[in-house]
Amino acid sequence: NSKVIQTPRYLVKGQGQKAKMRCIPEKGHPVVFWYQQNKNNEFKFLINFQNQEVLQQIDMTEKRFSAECPSNSPCSLEIQSSEAGDSALYLCASSPDPSQNTLYFGAGTRLSVL
Amino acid sequence: GDSVTQTEGQVTVSESKSLIINCTYSATSIAYPNLFWYVRYPGEGLQLLLKVITAGQKGSSRGFEATYNKETTSFHLQKASVQESDSAVYYCALTGDTNAYKVIFGKGTHLHVLP
């Protein structure tokens, strides 16, 4: 079973509402990734962190999406104003270091924007 | 561009029969692609099934095998005798040797094993 814990498993929001999801990475993994998997099963990288610092992020993330990984707290991904097109499975993954390209995934948060 | 194409949709196989899930890749911007098979069992997160980083090498895990073929740009997943517990969604993926953020996934193949 996955050691990356994501909550909640399901999230339902209306358009324009905030949507926030959390991730506890595997113990000892300072690198955290967020991916979005859409209804066509396509994966999109959103952002990654090493400890509390952002390593890479895509343009979409810089606008309505915000993410953080504070020390001693779960990482989070928040959508400020949800849109129907944000409905997807959001996957958190962790890694023991940036050069390690094997990812350890959580079960995901399925967001439905009505 | 970089892409992964795999057998799409659902594959149904009877228990104890053999399985092959096709995967081909294109890695025009990645000098040394590493190839992966991830699996998602019902209710669980994606987990690594096997990984091969060197062309010509074969990876194996839980009875599954895949060979990294640079000539045909393929990484097909095979198993000689499937079990009902193998029912899951399988994803072929590639990445650079050190850059995990640029992971390119296929769209997944849902394997349904009939008892």
Image: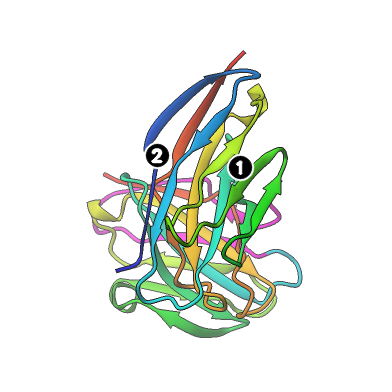
Q: Residue at x 43, y 75 (%)?
A: B30
- Pick the front one: A69 or B74: B74
The C terminus of chain A, quarter of image? top left
- Pick the front one: B33 or B89: B33
Rendered position, A110 above or below B72: above
Mark closest to the chain's N terminus, 2 or 1: 2
> Count of labels shown?
2
A72 inside magenta stretch: no
Q: Amino acid at mark 1?
A: Glu
| SS of the residue under disc 1 | loop
The N terminus of chain A, quarter of image? top right
Rendered position, B56 above or below B113: below
The residue pinned by badge 2 equals B7
Query: Is any part of residue A21 visible from this angle?
Result: yes
Indicate left or right for A60 with A21 as reference. left
Residue B99 placement (x, y as % from top left)? 52, 77
Residue B67 placement (x, y as % from top left)? 58, 52
Residue A34 placement (x, y as % from top left)? 48, 66
Query: In this picture, which residue range is highlighted in magenta?
Result: A1-25
Rendered position, A64 above or below B15: below
Q: Amino acid at mark 2?
A: Thr
- Pick the front one: B75 or A105: B75
Indicate left or right for B115 with A92 as reference. right
The residue pinned by badge 1 equals B44
Q: Residue at x 62, y 13 (%)?
A: B115
Quarter of the image where one finds residue A43:
bottom left
